[in-house]
Image (cartoon, helix red, strand yellow):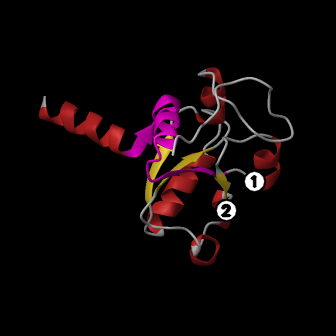
Amino acid sequence: MDAQIKFYENKLAFEMDPSDLFKALNNGEKVIALDARKFFGFEAEHIPTAINIPHSEMNQESTRHLDKDFTYVTYCDGIGCNASTKGALNMSKLGFKVKELIGGLEWWKFDGYATEGTKAGPTGEKIQCAC
């Protein structure tokens, strides 16, 4: 039992699902969605408020402006893409707190949340600030 408990605790420590990210963003938690895909993918469609740093470009210089007090939730297209995993690994190596978004952009939309970008759909629940 102890091994199972530790496994699931670790899983939750390093992963987040779309509803958890949506709640965290709406509640003003110190979390930032980080799109780890190339810019053209981000430009076409991304999670509102997300920033874009392609995993292959993550280094000391490209992340210098980021606040290490925040948790960065990396994502990519979905389960058929591992850019979010590569991004999470790179950000961790650079000293950032990181979680990976389960299901990526695909599951974000599947759960009914809005996106932004040149190919974003017109529907979905929007992130709102209540402050």
Asked if residue 47 lies left or right of residue 91, the reply is right
The residue at which mark 1 appears reads as: 38
User: Is 106 included in the stretch rendered in magenta?
Assistant: no
User: Is 28 included in the stretch rendered in magenta?
Assistant: yes
On the image, which quarter does residue 10 sit in?
top left
Q: Residues within 10 Å of mark 1 (few under 14, many from 20)?
A: some
Asked if residue 104 lies left or right of residue 10, the reply is right
Query: Which element is circle 1 on?
Result: loop
Query: Which element is circle 2 on?
Result: helix
Q: Which is nearer the eye, 93 or 12?
A: 12
Q: Which is nearer the eye, 118 or 104?
A: 118
The magenta stretch spans which residues? Answer: 14-36
Residue 102 x, y percent position in the rendering: 51, 34
Give the foreground label among 1 and 2.
1
Residue 41 x, y percent position in the rendering: 78, 46
> In this picture, is 76 found above or below 34?
above
Q: Residue at x 80, y 33 (%)?
A: 120
Asked if residue 91 lies left or right of residue 104, the reply is left
Report the disc number at residue 84.
none
Residue 27 x, y percent position in the rendering: 46, 41
Residue 91 x, y percent position in the rendering: 51, 62
What amino acid is at disc 2? Ser
What amino acid is at disc 1? Lys
The residue at which mark 2 appears reads as: 56
Give the mark nearest the N terminus, 1 or 2. 1
